[in-house]
Amino acid sequence: MSVEVDEHTVYEPDALVRCGALLPPGAVKLSDPLIVVEVLSSSTSARDASIKPDDDFRLPSVQHYLIVGTENRTIIHHQRGTDSIALTRIVREGPILLEPPGITLADCFPPGAA
């Protein structure tokens, strides 16, 4: 599924969560994701960590933007705050509460796991 930020900006995140009415059959784009997830790779890391979060937070529906770093086993969690401020935290262990919509991600990188 692609995320359409505006008529000139469309991204294909690695994963997303959307709540609401069902999309029409055959839909390939949406403009109201709640959670956007990008898994870093060497070819996309700069764009995924800088340009995309800024663009995606232009959509009022986006509440969380997660950047998953598999090499360093971290998740950078950008969360919509108040007054156009995004709160950012780096998570290395433990669960992540995504509110809204009320989803808890279990410990994504538990100690001792490879």
Image (tube, rainbow, N blue to C red):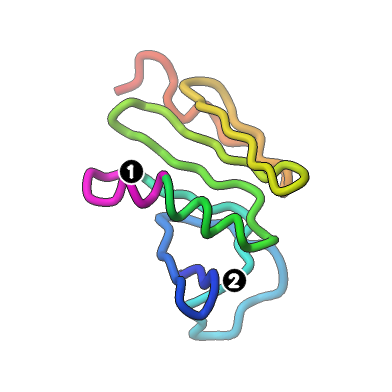
Residue plotted at (55% across, 31% down): 106
The image shows a total of numbered marks equal to: 2
Residue 105 screen position, x and y as percent: 57, 36
Q: Is residue 37 above or below residue 27?
A: above
- Residue position marked by numbered label 2 in the rendering: 31
- What is the residue that sits farthest to the bottom in this orientation? 25
Residue plotted at (50% across, 68% down): 3
Between residue 94 and residue 62, name the one nearer to us: 62
* Image quarter (top left, top right, bottom left or bottom right) of the C terminus: top left
Q: Is residue 4 magenta?
A: no
Residue 42 screen position, x and y as percent: 22, 44
Q: Is residue 43 above or below residue 21?
A: above
* Residue type (three-letter) at the residue carrying disc 2: Ser
- Mark 1 or mark 2, which has the lower sequence index? 2
Q: Quadrant of residue 10?
A: bottom left
- Residue position marked by numbered label 1 in the rendering: 40
Q: Is residue 95 left or right of residue 12?
A: right
Q: Is residue 44 above or below residue 6?
A: above
Q: Quadrant of residue 32?
A: bottom right
